[in-house]
Image (cartoon, rainbow, N blue to C red):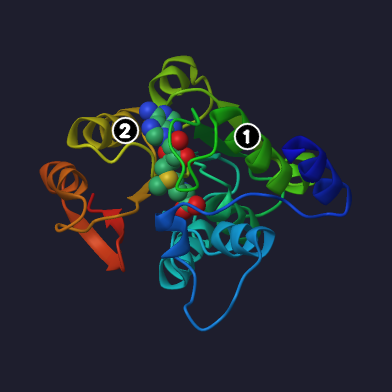
Amino acid sequence: MRSFLKTLLQRRGYELASLYPDERNRLPGDLTFSYREALYYIGSSLAGQISLDEAQLLADLVRSSDPSRPIVEVGTLFGHSTMVLAMAKRREQRLFTVDNYFWNPLGVRPQVHRAITRGRLKQAVDEHNVVIKDCSASEFYASYAEPPPALFFCDADHSYEAVHADLTWALQVGATIICGDDYEPKYHPGVVRAVDELGGAERLSGGLYVLKR
Ligand SMILES: C[S@@+](CC[C@H](N)C(=O)[O-])C[C@H]1O[C@@H](n2cnc3c(N)ncnc32)[C@H](O)[C@@H]1O
């Protein structure tokens, strides 16, 4: 009876499902949402992505970079910052974006995370010289055989050890502009410690930093 009811509802476009309490808390209290609407709302108002102010600084940095050399981003997530980089760069400039689909704020499985990201970045990949690298940052670094990046954007694992390793790689490989997200002592002390040890932040917009050279 229960499965018959479920099938009947699904055929008519309904779903028998409920939100987790933390999902419910993310919705505005003055509006009633269906389950589907709630998921769309949560999916399009995600945490973990760069803000508009940060995006403006990032875009300025890209426009000042040498278009004959690649951009490298570690930490694609769902492609929000990748789209900022892709929109600001010259079409011919290559952009490598690296993610191992280890974490996402929706809690979806890695294979779903990967599919959403690939779907969102399809046009960027097909027409704008964006290359998705489906691997860990360290695997990417070990296989990198391209010219020194014109810009390196660090936004993957936010632990001190990982950020230190990411920035050290960028320095060693000769990246010209090195920047990253979440220079925020309260929330990401590891990012702040690694950045400060390797030169400090020369410019800041929100949590977006440019490493001093
Ligand atoms: C904060 S999110 C990136 C946000 C994205 N740059 C934006 O602004 O839209 C961090 C991403 O880094 C990825 N990540 C974490 N550790 C990683 C690692 N060691 N190598 C590659 N990607 C990693 C996670 O899977 C996640 O998608």
Nearer to us of marks 1 and 2 is 1
- Residue type of the residue flagged with mark 2: Asp
Confirm or reject: label 1 Cβ below 8 Å from ligand 1.
Answer: no
Confirm or reject: label 2 Cβ below 8 Å from ligand 1.
Answer: no
Q: Residues within 10 Å of mark 1 (few under 14, many from 20)?
A: few
Residue at left offset 11%, top offset 42%: 197
Quarter of the picture containing the N terminus is top right
In this rendered view, identify the residue nearer to me: 108 or 184: 108
Instruction: Look at the numbered disc 2 and give the secondary structure of its residue.
Output: helix
Give the numbered dot on residue 112.
1
Q: Residue 105, position in %: x, y? A: 45, 48
Q: Quadrant of ligand 1?
A: top left
Would residue 181 be visible to someone looking at this image?
yes
Of the two numbered discs 1 and 2 on the same chain, state the one appearing first in sequence: 1
Would residue 49 be visible to someone looking at this image?
no
Give the numbered dot on residue 158.
none
| Residue most extreme to the front | 1
Q: Residue 70, position in %: x, y? A: 55, 39
- CA–CA distance in space, label 1 to label 2: 26 Å
Q: Residue 60, position in %: x, y? A: 48, 66
Q: Which residue is mark 2?
A: 166
In this rendered view, identify the residue nearer to me: 87 or 123: 123
Instruction: Look at the numbered disc 1 and give the secondary structure of its residue.
Output: helix
- Residue type of the residue flagged with mark 1: Val
Q: From the viewer's perspective, tell me whether residue 171 is left or right of residue 76.
A: left
Q: From the viewer's perspective, tell me whether residue 62 is left or right of residue 153.
A: right
Q: From the viewer's perspective, tell me whether residue 162 is left or right of residue 83.
A: left
Residue at left offset 34%, top offset 34%: 170
Position above or below: 82 against 169? below
In this rendered view, identify the residue nearer to me: 67 or 48: 48
Q: Residues within 10 Å of mark 2 (few under 14, many from 20)?
A: many
How many discs mark residues in the rendered view? 2
